[in-house]
Amino acid sequence: MGEIRTHRDDPEENSNHIHLPKKPKLSSFITQSQIQQEFAHHQHGVARLNNGSFGSCPGSIIAAQKRWQLKFLQQPDDFFFNQLPTQILRSRTLIKDIINADDVSEVSIVDNATTAAAIVLQQVGWAFAEGRFHKGDAVVMLHCAFQAVKKSIEAYVTRAGGSVIVVHLPFPIKSNEEIISEFRKGLARGKANGRKVRLAIIDHITSMPSLIIPVRELVKICREEGVSQVFVDAAHAVGSVSVDVKDIGADFYVSNLHKWFFCPPSVALLYCRKSSLSSSELHHPVVSHEYGNGLAIESAWIGTRDYSSQLLVPEVIDFINRFEGGMDGIRDRNHEAVVEMAEMLAKAWGTSLGSPPEMCPSMAMVGLPSSLGVLSDGDASRLRNHLRDQFKVEVPIHYQPLKDTAAAEEVEGGSADFITGYARISHQVYNTIDDYLKFRDAINQLLHDSFNCKMLPYPS
């Protein structure tokens, strides 16, 4: 890809010149101009620092998707009977190798991680309802689990008699040991009074705040503590960190392919370890005529809909292999770049990162100056909207309450400099230095306005 620079990045003329990690000049790999062409459909002038929520699909993959959509529309019957099953199996086979599963039968393709959570939690709910799990037995999850997962627990588990233990992780965080310690405490609470922990839900990469969780170690602890099943919600994982489901050892593992793997929305893999459950125990929540033929087959047909995003895994792999080092190279460069940009922003604002670099995937949590007044979730939402509307910067903002009451009172009184707001920045191949400079300058402008006007720099 070569060194990423902008048109005004002359080191002798621009004091803001910043170097991303150096890369050798490539003649046989994709160039920077080709990358920008692949993502030319992005809205012009927007600093897109939120790849984590929806991902981004290259133009060549969008074109390939349109070809698949046209094939269906040209002759739907031939497509359904002769092409769709074969092509989905092809995608599943490639996914099996990407995640190092033992057998293609362990891999299903579903719409997204939310669908996968419903599949897993539905069978847990049935186990409670049918008496295979005892009333009051527990499901353990991290407090920063995705909201849809929490709602699925409410819909399928608690109404069937299961209890929920929430493991609160510290943030900012310094090491994996803090996570492991709190998780052990959560399992102990789940096993109190003779109860059993029937399911542990572990994020591989938490969404907000964003952290890489020591998932392999937590799964091992679950096995030692007799947890019945382990479900890893890895919505952000494939394309952002290395994934080896056999090494991780969970019963279920889900990852979206439209976040960091360049697929169009929406497509996700659901790995179900062959030795964990029989196929008759897992079903897609949308019942079609394939019901009872195994989860992978059920998931491959849930009625008339657009299946094109599920068929594009071969084309996406071809796109990824245009980059030096393939997926490994993209992951490494994204991680290095997001850490460097996060440290640049923190230095510019006099703040700090929310975690060590090794706990950052292709995203990083950057502390915001306390004078921005992020003192609630509502403040975080308003700041995010203001950055989008007024500065064309798209970045999620996280509010982190202070545990120390005295410190919290000092912040509200304006007499202390504690971090309660964090920006979750991301880096994907289309990002340039200008994106981060634009964000830096937007925050600096808000700080300047706040200092001059003695009021919050965005609408309350």
Image (cartoon, grey):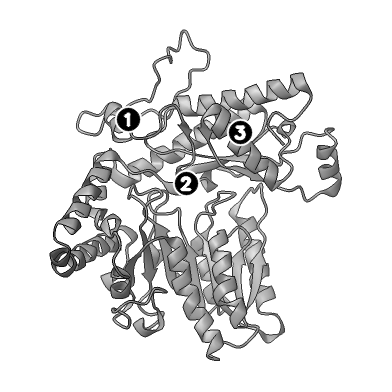
> Which residue carries the number 2 mark?
52
Residue drawn at (38%, 74%) of the image: 273
Q: Is residue 33 left or right of residue 173?
A: left
Q: Earlier in the sequence, mark 2 or mark 1?
A: 1
Residue 45 numbered mark, or none: none
Which residue is outermost to the bottom? 131
Few, some or many residues within 10 Å of mark 1 (<14, 14–19, 20+): some
Of the pair 53 and 389, the residue shown nearer to us = 389
What is the distance, in whole Å, between disc 2 and disc 3 at their CAs?
Answer: 20 Å
Few, some or many residues within 10 Å of mark 3 (<14, 14–19, 20+): some
Front of the two marks 2 and 3: 3
Q: Earlier in the sequence, mark 3 or mark 1?
A: 1
What is the distance, in whole Å, between disc 2 and disc 1 at their CAs?
Answer: 19 Å
Few, some or many residues within 10 Å of mark 2 (<14, 14–19, 20+): many
Residue 386 numbered mark, or none: 3
Is there a contact, CB below 8 Å, between mark 2 and mark 1? no
What is the distance, in whole Å, between disc 3 and disc 1 at their CAs?
Answer: 26 Å
Q: Secondary structure at mark 3?
A: helix
> Which residue carries the number 1 mark?
36
Of the 4 image quadrants, the one containing the N terminus is: top left
Q: Position of residue 271 (x, y in %)?
A: 37, 68
Q: Earlier in the sequence, mark 2 or mark 3?
A: 2
Residue drawn at (31%, 72%) of the image: 296
Residue drawn at (69%, 32%) of the image: 369
Decide if residue 249 is in sight here: no
Q: Position of residue 194 (x, y in %)?
A: 68, 86
Of the 4 image quadrants, the one containing the C terminus is: top right
Q: Amino acid at mark 1?
A: Gln
